[in-house]
């Protein structure tokens, strides 16, 4: 991957609303080069979507989040990929990761209520023939996500550089 593409990915990770003109100035490229590089990253599925980090605790939306450690028996000739694909297709599932250690998959889920989340675990996830065990931990409070601190520090924390 080219330096421009890497620089653009870092800039977009920090703020995906940056105008092309500003990214061009920050990278030393032309606006057209920036636009073409971003288009290439999108076409190559390096950039999959642009999404904000939201502090849901400051809204009136009811939701319950949990992290579920899942132990599974991998599918013959397909390994863990087939199991993960079956699990990530559920609408409650937000993320699935293959892990090393005491369990195989980490599944991040979200539902409107605790009852809906419990139903997902007991009736959908645990009943899959390849799932041999689960351990559910509920998110009680988020302090930091995607590099964003939710409470306290909101000022720019970069060091001041003066000539």
Image: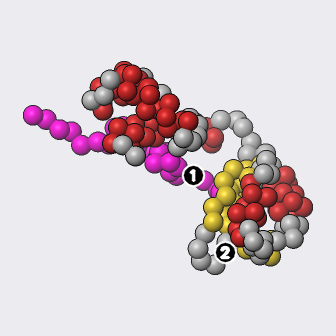
Left or right of residue 35, residue 59 in this image: right
Q: Position of residue 12 (x, y in %)?
A: 45, 36
Label 1 secondary element: loop
Residue under numbered circle 1: 142
Residue under numbered circle 2: 103
- Is residue 18 magenta-colored? no
- Disc 1/disc 2 C-alpha distance (Å): 23 Å
Please give the range of residues in magenta: 135-163
Residue at the extreme left = 163
Q: Dots 1 and 2: beta carbons under 8 Å?
A: no
- Decide whether the magenta segment is chiefly helix, strand or loop: loop
Image quadrant containing the C terminus: top left
- Of the residues tagged 1 and 2, which is closer to the observer? 2
Label 2 secondary element: loop
Q: Residue at x 57, y 42 (%)?
A: 45
- Is residue 145 magenta-colored? yes
Q: Residue at x 80, y 55 (%)?
A: 117
Left or right of residue 144, residue 160 in this image: left
Q: Is residue 3 visible in the rendered structure shown here?
A: yes
Q: Is residue 4 above or below residue 95?
A: above
Q: Position of residue 121 (x, y in %)?
A: 82, 62
**Which of pointers 1 and 2 lies earlier in the amino acid sequence?**
2
10 Å crowding of disc 1: few (<14), some (14-19), many (20+): few
Residue at the extreme front = 77
Q: Residue at x 44, y 26 (%)?
A: 35
Q: Is residue 123 above or below residue 10?
A: below
């Amino acid at each position: 991957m080219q330096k421009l593409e890497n620089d653009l990915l870092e800039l977009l990770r920090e703020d995906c609303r940056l105008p092309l003109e500003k990214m061009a100035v920050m990278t030393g490229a032309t606006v057209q080069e920036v636009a073409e590089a971003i288009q290439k990253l999108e076409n190559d599925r390096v950039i999959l979507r642009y999404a904000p980090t939201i502090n849901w605790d400051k809204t009136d939306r009811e939701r319950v989040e949990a992290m579920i450690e899942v132990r599974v028996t991998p599918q013959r000739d397909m390994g863990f990929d087939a199991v993960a694909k079956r699990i990530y297709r559920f609408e409650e599932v937000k993320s699935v990761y293959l892990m090393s250690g005491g369990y195989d998959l980490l599944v991040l889920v979200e539902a409107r209520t605790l009852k809906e989340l419990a139903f997902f675990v007991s009736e959908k996830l645990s009943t899959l023939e390849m799932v041999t065990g689960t351990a559910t931990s509920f998110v009680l409070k988020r302090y930091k996500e995607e590099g964003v601190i939710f409470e306290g520090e909101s000022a720019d924390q970069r060091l001041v550089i003066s000539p």
